[in-house]
Image: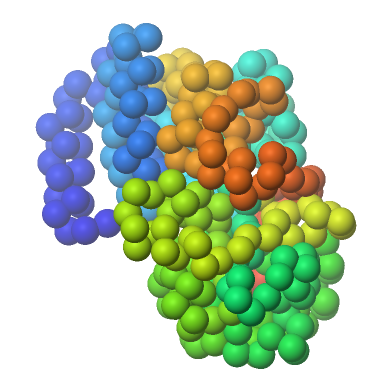
């Protein structure tokens, strides 16, 4: 977050604190860094009359802020964009586990928190994104990267571009690999990734995609929504990039491609709890789920939602097999994964 944006957020917070206790308001702390979401918030307000006050920050910033504010926090709803962060916040007691028959009915059990002691659920996945491999079409074919395991193959020395191992998206992928392969094989695999790196990790997922197109590396790891965003861009430079690369959804013939969630929760000290639950339920409505797909190129979590996103369709050919491990397990493996990364020198 830029300084200017922080200042605006802070000013908004101070200006609105006085009104935040009223019934028809909902206070959201959001890490969803996607401008296309605006219409979703305004639709909710139009439908319910509930005014939304929003503070935007990244996952880590939101968690730190909630801890600093404690019981005085005005936050009602928390939106985060990674399963490991959702799990961390749950463990740190920042969420209020809730019971909602609707959320339990429409969101698959593996894409939400395990039931808490009171039978409530601390957080819910609201959309999914797959972590896939992109490659240089001139050098390789899909078959070269049809499993995550192959990224560590010695034949690809100096070919891999990937963002920092400690970024939540990678921690979650590696946490999932730990579930599938066990810690020993996962650590050997991570060592193989380090050995294959074209250079030390830098930049975000979009930078890795561009690095493949520029020839800096032969293969890279990215979340699907960054790729879909480029595929749908009207900028000729983006088109030039996507023309050069192929995409693979790994492990289709074994456990399925790793999917992460963006999700939501009610804040531990929420004052507008009923509105918060209503908002989370609204995010599972066909209109909102369709928005996740068409607005931000994510997949709906609810079954049977029809959407028409040409980029998602083009990259999958219609559908793909995603892994079915409980997404909360990737959070539990986080510390173990970070220790492995330190041992193998994955920055
Ligand atoms: Fe992102």
Q: Is residue 316 above or below residue 142?
A: above
Query: Would residue 69 be visible to someone looking at this image?
Result: no
Q: Is residue 159 above or below residue 127?
A: below
Q: Quadrant of residue 50?
A: top left
Residue visible at 75% across and 89% down in the picture: 154
Residue visible at 79% across and 59% down in the picture: 251
Q: In the image, 6: left or right of 208?
A: left
Q: In the image, 317: left or right of 27?
A: right
- Say which quadrant the N terminus sits in: bottom left
* Residue 110 x/y as whole percent: 74, 39
Q: Nearer the viewer, residue 49 or 319?
A: 319
Residue visible at 67% across and 16% down in the picture: 101
Q: In the image, 239: left or right of 301?
A: left
* Residue 157 x/y as whole percent: 66, 90
Query: Would residue 143 be visible to someone looking at this image?
Result: yes
* Total residue callouts: 0
């Amino acid at each position: 977050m830029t300084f200017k944006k922080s200042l605006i957020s802070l000013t908004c917070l101070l200006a609105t604190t006085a009104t935040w206790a009223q019934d028809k308001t909902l206070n959201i702390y959001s890490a969803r860094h996607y401008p296309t979401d605006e219409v979703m918030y305004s639709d909710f307000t139009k439908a319910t009359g509930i005014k939304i006050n929003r503070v935007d920050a990244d996952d880590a910033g939101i968690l730190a802020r909630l801890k600093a504010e404690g019981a005085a926090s005005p936050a009602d709803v928390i939106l985060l964009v990674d399963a490991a962060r959702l799990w961390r916040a749950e463990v740190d007691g920042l969420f209020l586990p809730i019971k909602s028959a609707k959320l339990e009915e429409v969101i698959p059990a593996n894409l939400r928190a395990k039931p808490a002691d009171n039978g409530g659920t601390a957080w819910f996945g609201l959309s999914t994104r797959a972590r896939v491999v992109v490659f240089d079409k001139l050098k390789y074919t899909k078959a070269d990267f049809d499993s995550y395991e192959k990224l560590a193959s010695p034949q690809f020395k100096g070919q891999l571009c990937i963002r920092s191992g400690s970024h939540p998206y990678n921690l979650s992928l590696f946490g999932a690999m730990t579930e599938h392969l066990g810690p020993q094989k996962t650590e050997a695999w991570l060592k193989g990734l380090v050995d294959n790196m074209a250079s030390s990790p830098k930049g975000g997922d979009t930078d890795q995609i561009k690095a493949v197109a520029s020839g800096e590396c032969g293969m890279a790891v990215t979340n699907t929504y960054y790729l879909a965003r480029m595929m749908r861009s009207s900028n000729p430079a983006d088109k030039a990039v996507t023309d050069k690369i192929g995409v693979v959804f790994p492990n289709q013939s074994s456990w399925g491609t790793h999917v992460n969630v963006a999700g939501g929760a009610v804040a531990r000290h929420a004052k507008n709890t009923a509105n918060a639950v209503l908002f989370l339920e609204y995010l599972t409505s066909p209109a909102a789920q369709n928005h996740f797909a068409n607005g931000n190129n994510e997949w709906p979590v609810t079954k049977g939602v029809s959407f028409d996103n040409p980029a998602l369709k083009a990259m999958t050919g219609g559908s793909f097999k995603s892994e079915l491990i409980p997404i909360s397990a990737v959070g539990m493996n986080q510390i173990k994964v970070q220790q492995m990364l330190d041992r193998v020198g994955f920055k």
